[in-house]
Image: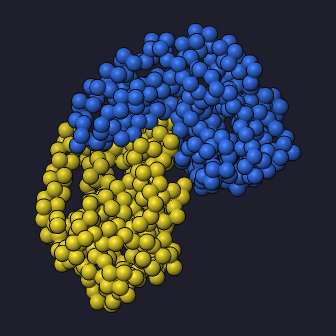
Amino acid sequence: MLEVKEAGLWTTVQDMGRVGQYHLGVPPSGAADKYSYMIGNLLVGNPIEFAALEMTLLGGTFFFQQQTLIALTGAPMDAYLNERPIPFWQAFTVKEGDLLKITSCAKGVKSYLCISGGIDVPEVLGSKSTYELSRIGGFYGRKLVTGDMLNIHEPLPGAFKQAGKSVPLEFVPAFSNFQELRLIVGLSSYLVSDSGVKTFLSSEWTVSPESNRLAYRYKGPRLSFTEHHPPFGAGSSFSNVVDFAYPIGSVMFTNEEELIVLHNDATTGGGFVTIGTVISQDMDLVAQSRPFSTCHFVTVTIDQAIQIRTERRKKIEHLVQLLGR
Amino acid sequence: MFNLPETSFNFGGDEYIYAEISRDMRVESNFKALAITEEVRKRNIPGIIDVVSSNASYLVRYNPDVISARDLLVYLKEIDLTKSDPARLHLPVRIVEIPTWYDDPVTQEYSRRFQNRHPEPGLSNFEYVMKVNGFTDKEAFIERHSQTPYLITMVGFLPGTAWHFPLSHHQNNIIQSPKYDSPRTDTPERAIGLGGAFNVIYPVNGPGSYQLIGRSAVPVVDPTKRLADLMETSFLARPGDIWKYRPITEQEYNQIKVETEEGGYRYKMKNIMLSPLEYLEKGETYIRELMEDF
């Protein structure tokens, strides 16, 4: 059992996400920064997809009522085990009665607390991930609050052999205040004028504070759209198209001065103009973008995107070798 | 075959393929999307994660570690070209009645609450939609809006939300409306919204940009599974189903609401076999036949 003494700013149970329900309007949810989340699981000897806690900007305080093995990954928050500082990206044994206090981070947004055996919540529609808007999955479908008592599974047999293992520095993300986000241009990009596409790609975009698990919002320069007559059925605004199902990672313009990148809890469809889709690897970077940090967008082809994906897979396979039990 | 342009395919990042059947909204485009997604789903291809039929397009999510992106594109193009013969399409769907209180006080109140982001702050959403469609008589508007059956052309946004599009052959008869430029931060559950030519019923409270014209007495989601008809999935909406509004009074609205809260309400429904070919050939006559004894 894990007792929540302080819940932090926005702490939810997440795993790899929910699939096969998108046609019903149920988004995937799941860990926002998959890379950090998966590595946390590897550190504690779990399969990569076991449910963990995702914390946002401000961690939380947790009281362990049983001995287990834990690891913290993601945005480097200050963390203390019984008031003694502990590092991220390393596996630790915690004993019954230990208090883990996780405070704020100077870089990044999302941190993960992975526990051997995983968080024990029921699967809903095939996943333990929390989707708060519809109160699906996770711990009663919501973020944690002070006083919650979470069931955690027994540590996996042999897990304690992992204690002390850590992730080599070259595998730890930088959590930079400037991100380069790679996307494949397409969808309704034909509605953005040539000079609009140029402005989009050559400008710096600033993350706004309203960003969350549904979508990250960015402010930037004014963009020009092609002067099109909205297609029949779409509404009357230049930025409307006939509503369609959005890919996660869609980059869309809600008006001429704001763009949105849809994240894992996105509304699954709508009628805004989309210029393309951020590749799945870089959704981790989006998730870790702090308010007022900046980014710019770079186009890649499908072949480049697949190559980037393969490189990342190899990196994780390498870590499995390195950290595996 | 449907009289449709060539489908335009796009890679949506490394995990999605997006297929746009037509840029404008047509009932044929939706029938084709239903046909293709049904075929893809039936084939149960390893590595395909999600298959979504939408208004005039469809979306496939796949795992590129299992299927090559370019091979899947070729594969989908082939299905798109060969598997949408309307003559071979028979959709087992339902007609469902939505008892509706048009121009109710709650949606009027929301019009006022969010009037600062509305193009015509002095009008309620209902009055605005009447005005932009040239109606001066409320009853005439309700009559037009409720007599047309609506095809569910897409499910999404929030779980259980269904876009539905009028089954009318005459574009001029279709009620349309601009959306809010800046979305409302809240919408009452079961509110009926109109944006472009599409209607939605908001399943739960939440953001929204469609004009609110009334309220359904019956829920479209039932997470607690009290209602026998929503037991299976807890969602009322299914792509391809037909929804029919029936105008009701405040008194009947309250009565139905009590029945749904107590769990005894049964939706008025009829199972039919929807034939896109007959719709294309006979148009509204076919729809009238389908609706005859409903």
Which residue is at the far top? B281
Residue B274, x across and y down, in percent: 58, 20
* Residue at (17% x, 61% y) in the render: A320
At x 35%, y 32%, the residue is B44
Q: Is residue B237 left or right of residue A266?
A: right
On the image, the x and y values in percent for residue A95 come to 31, 85
Q: Which residue is drawn at the image coordinates 27% and 31% (left, top)?
A: B72
Left or right: A16 in relation to B201: left
Residue A149 vs B155, above or below: the answer is below
Is residue A151 in view? yes
Rendered colour, chain B = blue
Position above or below: A127 against A173: above
Residue at the bottom extreme, as displayed: A83
Q: Is residue A176 visible?
A: no
- Quadrant that contains the N terminus of chain A: bottom left
Frontmost residue, B119 versus A316? A316
Question: Residue B194 appears in which quarter of the rendering?
Answer: top right
| Image colour assigned to chain A | yellow
Closer to the camera in the image, A99 or A235: A99
Compared to A96, does A9 lie above or below? above
Residue B264: horizontal and vertical position, in percent?
Answer: 75, 46
Name the spot of residue B168 as percent of width and height, x first: 64, 20
> Which quadrant: the C terminus of chain A?
bottom left
> At 54% from the left edge and 58% from the top edge, which residue is drawn?
A135
Q: In this image, A260 relative to A133: left or right?
A: left
Is residue A113 rendered to the left or right of residue B172? Answer: left
